[in-house]
Every structure is written in structure tokens, then in C-alpha cells.
Amino acid sequence: MNRHTQANPATLHQPTRHDSAPKHVSGSAEYIDDIVEPEGTLHAYLALSERAHAEISAIDLDAVRKSPGVVGVLTSADIPGDNDVSPAHKHDEPVFADKLVQFWGQPMFAVVAETREAARRAAHQARIEYRDLDWIPDVRTAQAAGGRMVTEPLKLERGDVDAGLASAPRRLKGEIRIGGQDHFYLEGHIAMVVPGEDEDVTVYSSTQHPSEVQLMVSHVLGIHQHAVTVNVRRMGGGFGGKETQGNLFAAVAALAAKRFNRAVKIRPDRDDDMTATGKRHDFVVDYEVGFDDEGRILAVDAVYGANGGFSSDLTGPVSDRALFHCDNAYFYPAVRARSEPLYTNTVSNTAFRGFGGPQGMVGCERWVEDIAYALGKDPLEIRKLNFYGTDTNNVTPYHQAVGDNIIHRIVDELESSSDYQKRREAVRTFNRENAILKKGIALTPVKFGISFTATWYNQGGALVHVYRDGSVHLSHGGTEMGQGLHIKVAQVLADAFGLGISEVKITATTTGKVPNTSATAASSGSDLNGMAAYDAAQQIKRRLVTHAAQVYKCEEDACQWVAGGLQAGDEFVPFKELIASAYLNRVQLSAAGFYKTPKIHWDRATGRGHPFYYFAYGASVSEVTIDTLTGEYTVDRVDILHDVGRSLNPAVDMGQVEGGFIQGMGWLTTEELNWDDKGRLRTHAPSTYKIPLASDVPPIFNVKLAEWSQNAEPTIGRSKAVGEPPLMLAISVVEALSMAVASVADYKVAPRLDTPVTPERVLFGVERMREAKA
Ligand code: MTE
Ligand code: MOS
């Protein structure tokens, strides 16, 4: 048997390991900093502003230029094209600030030197005089100052909210402050650019969005997009932080490469990466909710204030997605939700796993919790009472009906598999019997909308070649950041051709092969690119069947794809043989595939439409113990049941669910960003910014995929997107901490913890409870 027919073709839906796993663990996976540098490669480094908001009155770069090893300095005056990398095309994000500085850490110029160290040292030699201006540090200050928006706010409205609130038997108001988050990808931002003939540049960029890097580089250099080729084999994590934030680095390296006609690499230190690039938006949510004595929600009125930072970037769509998740899994008879995408003088906040959805849900779960404490009930009871129905009570604030609601089954199964009710009783008993240590337990649901809300982004492309030996070359528009997209798409292709996975070559993403791609984001990578690759395979397969019908003298209908080849009438033709014969008969063995998500539409002006193709669901139960003397706590046990439809790869999906949960837990508990009174980020390294460690994984961590779930829509293999939704499962940790704190005042007062719920916040919460009780 030849090696093509003996491989196990049953690859789709199997727990195939990540294609790069052995390379990841052995250190042989190639990241941009590992690419062999062309001879004479120069290194660029950014100089960052040291004011939050100021006019630049004088700038003296003499000492920089004279610094050892320096080849040149680039300022805004050296930009042949546009001094702008705004992904929102608002022209509000300069590559280099020239007259005005808008946040502490804004790039002002770049030094290009023979070594990275020389460039880095020289960048600090500039003498800059600033004229300080008033500046806006946060959401509340921005709102008090009149609320300048970086982009048009959104309003979602359904039903009569004022009447609903006025007639509700009970009402309450509140606010929650939700902190931001640094992406803390292991590989920081980096780009290397090799200049070519004429206008040409070849860009290696750690980006989730090669097509946009291509566009931005072309704008900044003032050249055609066709002259720019962007390549990315893999990122060492992106998490949304490389959806737009890579533009700047690629643009600077490209400028320098063209200017000096040498390859140029740029890689900021971790501290500078954290200081200069955008993060998850911090929010302040103000809400009023009307409900009845059972806890049924009657009306919700909420304002989501988002810290957009100094430029628009993705703040519009991020704050939109927060509103799209102000309902989580709950039906509101009347609702009005408004976004305030606010301008401030911080770094421009950006995409981060969940893209505003998590902040939307944290707000929502806060008023659900408030209702529970007001009525003295288990928050889970309130949750279940308010879940969307399946046929009735299923219309969202954006007027899309929830057509695929499985939250009831998910929550019921998890409630019993985690033994929630018994454990909650045990927790209450523990709290009665223990004065210092207190426990809490909570079950929270997740419903997350899948599709880019900018409808046009919901397209994917692939380019598939079959070579003469029957091996397959796969290229698609998505990027790999550790999430396992490439292996999933390779599985789709292997399955389509009846081949083993090793017959499919995964290649770097490049704008030269698949053009005009969307960011690999919104969890839609496998939905879009998996389908596009499938489409390409179908085209090639159709040609092969036509060919086989002629050669083996059978009807096309009598041709059947089986493992390892084609059954053409009575004849089994191994794939390799079929390809060899097709080649000799001049059959085209390459195809470009394409896919666009059906059904979706969205009208932002009216706040109505069908923005999501489907929803992904999940639920989690967390149990915690707090120390009421210090505020320290442990997360003792977590149970998760998560819906990925019919999994394309259960091994990869489990990794996404576990990793997403832990990343969400970090955001909501220990990862605290701290800016000082000058607007300087003080938590710009792991010494002060606390991401979860391996030791923070709960000692009992029961994670399960809802194996019975299938996507009701005909997605690739009936799977569902998995990248972002699990992050929001971590909200149960907040709610469990909340219960533990509330126990101090006999669960009679809502503890209203802001996030991240650091040990300090737990301690202050406990003190508030003690005062309330006294
Ligand atoms: N998983 C890993 N390991 N690394 C990442 O950077 N990014 C997340 C998620 N999972 C990320 C990850 C984010 S923000 C998104 S949108 C999705 O992966 C993107 O990939 P997908 O569309 O292929 O799921
Ligand atoms: Mo993910 S935040 O959509 O890159």
C-alpha cells in the first residue's frame, strides 16, 4: 500500500493534536524573531511620549542621531504617505505624534540602528519640551467633562422601558466598574520588513489581520497594496491584541526598510509593548432595573461607558458588542441600552477575547445578582426564571429572535453534574460554622453571538493546490495564534479528500495567496476559513469526478469518494493515482475557495437586525474560599459544560475552553491595571501585573463539552465557534466571591464588587458587609 491510502482518513471531529504542538514544546516553532535575518538587517526602536496630553513645543534629536550605532531617525516628516494607521479609517491614529501627544507612551519617532540595543538606548537620548494640557484619565472624568465620543454611540431599544420601570413592583439602580486587561501574549509585537525592487516590500508581522497590515503599510508608504505582501506563519498569542495593534510596528519597519534599503526588524520590550499598545476596554455601567417579587425582570435601562482611549480604533464595534451582550441569556420585556464610547488620554483600547461582550455580560450579571440579594434568593433561581424561552420570550434587545436556545439543557445538566444544590447547602453550613473563612458558590450562564457585527467581515477565502504526488497544499485567510485554526482547516481538507492529515501541508498565511481577508477574530476563523477550504476542495473534486467518469467509463453519479481515493464504478482509484492521471489529462488541480456567512444583516442606525448567525452557549459553577481577615482567596473547584456544536477537534476545543476560562478568571480577579496621576501605566511587567499562573488553575477543574450539541445552522461539520465564549464562564468566579463576601451580612446585602475582584476588593467588601450588619 502506498502511504496515501494507509493513513487514517477519519480526521474530522477527532482530537487530532495541534500541528505545531511538538514544535511549541521543543522550541522549534518559528516565530518572527526566529526567522534568519537577511544580511545587513537593521533594528528600529520607538521613542515614547512622557506626557498624557501635551503639545510638543520643542524636540531635539541631535543626541539621538549621534548615539553609537545609529543609522537614522524617522519622524512624521519622513513619511512619504499618510501619517496614520487608524483601522477605523478615522485618521486619528498617527504613526508618530508630531504636534500633539495624546497619551503617555505614544510613539514620537523611531531610531534605526545596527543593533536593537543601540536603537533602544538612542531612543532615550531625545530632548523634548512639552506644553501640558488638561487630560482625561477615565470614564467618569470623561463623562463629567461632557463625554466626547471617539465614535457614534449605539442605542438598542425594545418595548416601553419608562412604562416598564414605572409600573414595576420593585426597582433598583446601581453601577459597576469593570477593569481592563493586558493581552500578555507570550510573543510581543514584532515585525520584520524586507525591501524589494520598485515599490515592493515583504512584511513579516505578528498580526491577526494581514490584509489590514498590508493596507496600512501601503497607506503609510504611499504605494499600491499590490506591492505589499504580508506573511504570518503563527503568533505566540494574539487574543485580540494583534487585531489592529500590529499595524504600527509593521508600518515603522516598512518605512525604515524603504528608507535605508535594508531589512529592518522592530520588537519593543515587554514594558514598552504594554505601555504603547491598546488593551481590553475598562467600562463603567450604570443601570436601573425593574422586576417583580418573584425576580422576573420587567425593564432594564443601562448605559455602558467605555474607555476608548485616545483614538477610535475598534472602540465603536467593541462597545456595540457590549450592548449585544447586555442580555446575556435573559429575556427583557423592555430594554434600553446605550453605549458611550468615550475619548480619554490613555492608550487606545482595542479588541480582547470577547470584544466587549464580556463587559456587557458582567454588567448584566450584576443586576441579576442585585435582584437576587434584594429578594433573598439564590441568584441561580433568578437566572433560570429569566432565561430566554425557545418559542416565546426570545427576542433580543436588537430584535433578533434567539432561534437555537439550549441554555436550559446546558444549565440543568451542569447543575446536576456539579451537584450544585447540595454543595450550595454545604457552603451555607460552612459559613454558619466558620467565622474567618467563608465560602461561596455560583452558577452562571453564557450565550455569545457568533459573527462579526460588521456584516462584510463575514467572508473567508482559501487557496488549495494538489501537487502531482497527491499531496495537498493549504492556504487560507485565517491566522494561527495558538488556537488551533490551522489544524482544524487541515482536518476539513483531509476529510474532504479522504486523506490522512499528514498529506495536507499547512502553510503561512499570506496576502499574496488569499486577498482581502478579515481579521482572524470574532471566533469565526474556522467557520469562515473551514468553509472556504471546503469549497475549494469541492471544486477540485468535481473536476476529478468528471475526469474519472471519462477515464474509467462510468457515470459521474457512480463515482463515490471513499477513504484513500475514489470509487469510480467498479474501480477503486487511489487518490495518488487519480491525481497523476488527472495531471496528465490537464485537469486543473488548484482552486480558490470562498465563503460568506448567510442570513445575517444589521442596521446600526435603527438598532435592528440579525447580526448573529447563531449563538454559542455554556455554563460554569465556581466555588471559592475567602479569608475575611486578609481578603485572600482560593478558587477551589470549577465545573464547566460548554457548547461547541459538533466539535471539529475536541482536543483543541477543550484547550480553548480551559484557556479561555483561566484568562477570564485572570481578568476578573488578579489582573489589575494601574495608572498613576500623570497617566503613566505602572503595571507594565509581570512583576506588577498579575496574570494567572499554572498554580492558579483550580485543583478541581471538570471541563466538558456538550457532546449532544450540533449547530442548527449548516456550519462546517455542524461545529460552533469556540475561541471567545469560554472566557465569560469566569463570571461565576466573581459571583462566588460575591456570595462569600455577602455571607458576612447573612446574604442580605448585595456586595457589589467591582472587577477585578482583587484580595483588596474582597477585604473592602467584607468591611462594608460588617458595617451593614452592625
Ligand atoms: N487561543 C490562543 N491559544 N491564542 C490566542 O491568541 N485568541 C482568542 C481565541 N483563542 C487566542 C485563542 C481570540 S480573541 C479569538 S477571536 C479566537 O481565538 C480567534 O481564533 P478563531 O476564530 O480561529 O477561534
Ligand atoms: Mo478576538 S478579540 O475577536 O481577536
Image (spheres, rainbow, N blue to C red):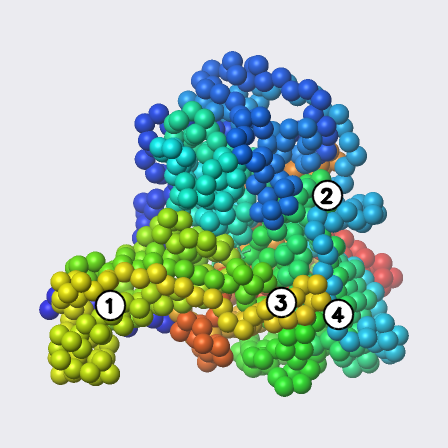
The disc labelled 1 sits on which kind of residue? Answer: Leu
The reply, left or right, for residue 140 in relation to residue 523 is right
The kind of secondary structure element at disc 1 is loop
Image quarter hosting the C terminus: bottom right
Depth check, front residue: 677 or 509: 509
Residue where numbered disc 1 is placed: 499
Q: Amino acid at mark 4?
A: Glu
Q: From this viewpoint, is residue 331 visible?
A: yes
User: Dot 4: few (<14), some (14–19), or many (≥20) neighbours within 10 Å?
Assistant: many
**Disc 1 or 3, which lies upstream in sequence?**
1
Would you name the residue on which mark 2 appears?
Answer: 344
Task: Residue 63 in the image: state x and y as whole percent.
Answer: 56, 14
Q: Quadrant of residue 401?
A: bottom right
Q: Eyeballing the image, is 693 above or below 265?
A: below
- Asked whether disc 2 touches disc 3, contact meaning CB atoms under 8 Å apart, the reply is no
Q: Is residue 9 left or right of residue 356?
A: left
Tag 2 and tag 1, C-beta contact below 8 Å: no
Q: Which of marks 3 and 2 precedes in the sequence? A: 2
Instruction: Name the image quarter holding the N terminus.
Output: bottom left
Query: Real-space Cα distance between discs 4 and 2?
Result: 27 Å
Residue at (69, 36) in percent of width and height:
102
Residue of label 4:
157
Looking at the rendered image, the disc whose residue lies closer to the viewer, 2 or 3, is 3
Q: Give the quadrant of residue 651.
A: bottom left
Provide the residue designation for mark 3.
Answer: 602
Which labelled disc corresponds to residue 619?
Answer: none
Find the distance from the CA under tag 2 to the CA under tag 3. 28 Å
Residue sitting at the far left: 1
Quick one: label 2, few (<14), some, or many (20+) residues within 10 Å? many
**x, y percent for residue 632:** 66, 53
CA gap between label 2 and label 1 equals 54 Å
Q: Is residue 159 left or right of residue 501?
A: right
